[in-house]
Amino acid sequence: MLSEKIQAALNAQINEEMESALFYLQMAAVSDRLGLPGFVNWFKMQYTEELSHADRFFNYVLERNGEVTLQAIEKPELQDETPLSLFEKALAHENHISKCIFSLKDLAKTESDHATDVFLEWFVNEQVEEEAAAQGVIDQLRLVDGSPNGLFMIDRELAARKPESSEAA
Ligand SMILES: [Fe+2]
Ligand SMILES: [Fe+2]
């Protein structure tokens, strides 16, 4: 049985993950305008991953016999983006999501909800990967410093990203 506080926080996190999905899908559209098909692939992959995160929270709430209440999703705010600014925004967004997961985990501890605490472990690890992935691309983009050749190579690399089996779970 979920406490009211935990249930509300888990519901809020479903929305955060849905918002993340929308944000990355918009990023994919912007990348298409920039003529970067590899970036489109990477952001679309990220979009489906975020949907699977929302689904994990959704399933968990139901599994604990809780109630899911979905809220409106904020519109993604993107304008005049460059390849670098897209990934800087992605990293800032993932930092925000990590904070959400950490406060959820703190709440689970205060409420002595051990099951939720353990459930959130997966997300703690996932956020380490999410931040590292965005940071990795930022590092590469800074290295090539806007050179068309460098950008072309990074785009080729991002085109090679395939869905991971753990992400499909
Ligand atoms: Fe996520
Ligand atoms: Fe994420």
Image (cartoon, rainbow, N blue to C red):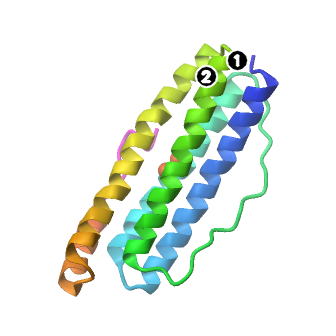
The residue under the point 63% across, 29% down is 60
Above or below, 30 relative to 157: below
Q: Is mark 1 within 8 Å of ligand 1?
A: no
- Magenta residue check for 168: yes
- Give percent across and percent down for residue 166: 39, 39
Q: Which mark is residue 116?
A: 2
- Magenta-drawn stretch, dominant element (helix, strand or loop): loop
Above or below, 85 relative to 56: below
Of the numbered discs 1 and 2, the one sitting upstream in the chain is 1
Task: Name the residue nearer the viewer: 70 or 107.
Answer: 107
Q: Residue at label 1?
A: 111
- Give percent across and percent down for residue 135: 34, 57
Q: Secondary structure at mark 1?
A: loop
Q: Secondary structure at mark 2?
A: helix
The residue under the point 78% across, 28% down is 5
Measured in 3D between alpha carbons, the distance from the residue under mark 1 to the one under mark 2, in whole angstroms, is: 10 Å
Residue 64 is left or right of residue 137, and the answer is right
Structural crowding at the residue carrying mark 2, measured as other residues with C-alpha within 10 Å and reported as few (<14), some (14–19) or many (≥20): many
Q: Is residue 162 visible?
A: no
Q: Amino acid at mark 1?
A: Glu
Q: Which mark is residue 151?
A: none
Number of numbered discs: 2
In the picture, the quarter occupied by the N terminus is: top right
Find residue 100 and report its image quarter: top right
Above or below, 110 relative to 90: above
Q: Amino acid at mark 2?
A: Thr
- Magenta residue check for 45: no
- Give percent across and percent down for residue 96: 55, 50
**Where are the magenta residues, as a range?**
161-169
